[in-house]
Image: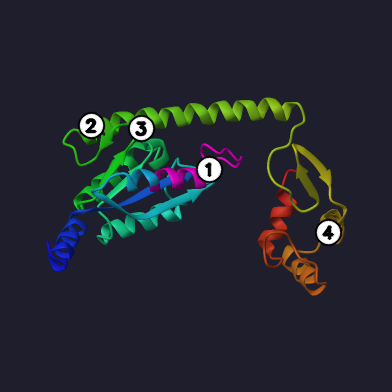
Amino acid sequence: MNRYERMNQERKIVDVRKRVAAYCRVSTDHEDQANSFESQQRYFRQYIERNPDWELYEIFADEGISGTNTKKRSEFKRMIACAKEGDFDLIITKEISRFARNTLDSIYYTRDLKKHGVGVIFMNDNINTLDGDAELRLAIMSSIAQEESRKTSERVKWGQKRQMEQGVVFGRSMLGYDVKDGKMTVNEDGAKIVRLIFHKFANENKGTNVFSRELREAGITPMRVKEWSNTVILRVIRTAK
């Protein structure tokens, strides 16, 4: 076989290889090596490389976002858009609960992808959406995953409620308070601003629009937003903590 024939053969092999994307999601904040982005991406990359009929297109990954719905998963939505554009042929993901815990979402997206000729392989669930019975199996497994997600949420909420009864604080730091290791402590710099806001509101009877302007003119900056506004002031006043 001469060089040109070999090149043609290699080109044919490349042409028939499926372009494969992978999707992973880590919904917890703790550093678990088994579920970290790095280990998941390494796993998918090696898994695809071991299949001679596949070539890696891209690994899409969302971090720290609940899988209960798909509204805030930017990489998931970008992956779906790329699939519809014909950028790749197949998506692999570990399990349905990593893809979508909502049964309707699972069926909607996999059915829509199938219309564009793109299949989804759920590795742990042994489902390939291009198979004839895949949708029925997907509906059953998605319902199970959704119910498990609901039970897990209830268990977490129950545990948090018991801990809160013992004085543990959940949530993040806010104006006037620092939250760390389940304990809330007064942040004096922020507390001065909170006292000033309540003084203007309760003692000086000023409207929120008026003293939000006064805070801006005084060069006092709020937390997590660019500037004081009527909405920000009301949020401070109404926050139970």
Q: To which residue does mark 4 refer?
A: 193
Amino acid at dot 4: Ile
Amino acid at dot 2: Leu
Mark 1, Cα crowd under 10 Å, few <14 / some 14-19 / many 20+, is some
Q: Residue at x 27, y 62 (%)?
A: 85
The residues tagged by marks 3 and 2 sit, at their Cα atoms, a distance apart of: 17 Å
Amino acid at dot 3: Asn
The residues tagged by marks 2 and 4 sit, at their Cα atoms, a distance apart of: 58 Å
Label 1 vs label 4, nearer the camera: 1
In the rendering, at what x and y percent does residue 117 appear?
20, 52
Mark 4, Cα crowd under 10 Å, few <14 / some 14-19 / many 20+, is some
Q: To which residue does mark 2 refer?
A: 136
Q: To which residue does mark 3 refer?
A: 124
Mark 4 or 3 closer to N-term? 3
Q: Nearer the viewer, residue 9 or 171?
A: 9
Q: To which residue does mark 1 refer?
A: 36
Mark 2, Cα crowd under 10 Å, few <14 / some 14-19 / many 20+, is few
Which quarter shows the N terminus? bottom left
